Amino acid sequence: MKYPTWVCFSWSLLTVAVIPVSLGEMYTSLLNVKQAISVERKLIDYLRIYIDHEFERLEDIKRFYAKVSDLHTELYKGPATAMANPLVAFTLIKRLHSEWLNVVYSNEALENTQALRSSYEEEEADLPKLEDLQGAAKGLMRLQDVYALQVASLVRGCFQRVTKGKPIDIYLPAVSVPLSGDDCFLVGKLSSKIKVAIQ
């Protein structure tokens, strides 16, 4: 069957115009995902450092707690014991005057949080933006729509559609990632905004 020249020309024009854009979008998306993975690896390292610093800080607090608890368990059984020994009185007053203040008003927690925030802000320019998140959600909705995927299976991290009453896997990813309730809410929220905009 021979097609009219205008049909061939239209098809050629469509192919030339659409396919490079699609490939470009796919390449950009893959590049963006690769960059996002790299950024998250850095953030994980920063978080590990933060956790280590916080762990050290909490260990210091635990040691202080153990020391004070032991003193009250063993040494301060009766107020007369504490008052009879000037060294006990001195260490008690010193602890109440300075050590407790160091624990209660320590800036270490704030400094650790600020260091983590600072590291995060260094990477902020490379983090996905709101429009990237919305684009990823739209991509999921497009996949679900085009391939008639079951929403319940997508939530579980599977790509299935119902064929003749039975769920059929149409794609088996190497790593399956289920969607959280928050993930589903976000996609649903975006979906309802799109439906309202279409109407």
Image (cartoon, helix red, strand yellow):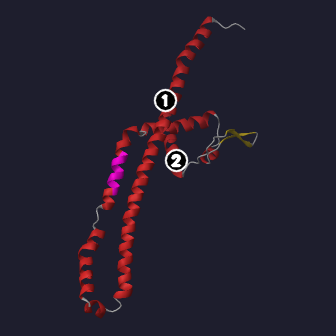
Front residue of 193 and 49? 49
Q: Which quadrant would residue 86 be assigned to in this image? A: bottom left
The image shows residue 163 at horizontal and vertical percentages of: 73, 38
Q: Amino acid at mark 1?
A: Thr
Q: Is residue 118 magenta?
A: yes
**Label 1 SS:** helix
Q: Residue furthest right?
A: 164
Residue 11: x and y in percent read: 60, 14
Q: Amino acid at mark 2?
A: Asp
Q: Is residue 197 magenta?
A: no
- Name the foreground residue: 100 vs 153: 100
Which quadrant of the structure image shows residue 58?
A: bottom left
Q: Nearer the viewer, residue 119 or 138?
A: 119
Q: Position of residue 8 (x, y in %)?
A: 62, 9
Q: Residue at x 23, y 83 (%)?
A: 90
Q: Which residue is mark 1?
A: 28
Q: Is residue 85 above or below residue 193?
A: below
Q: Nearer the viewer, residue 194 or 145?
A: 145
- Give the crowd class for mark 1: few <14, some 14-19, many >=20 residues within 10 Å: few
* Mark seen at residue 122: none
User: Which stretch is magenta?
Assistant: 112-120
Q: Mark 2: which secondary structure?
A: helix
* Residues packed near mark 2 inside 10 Å, few (<14), some (14 to 19) or many (20 plus): few
The main secondary structure of the magenta stretch is helix
Residue 183 tag number: 2
Mark with earlier residue (1, 2): 1
Q: Is residue 158 left or right of residue 59?
A: right
Left or right: residue 174 compared with residue 111 = right
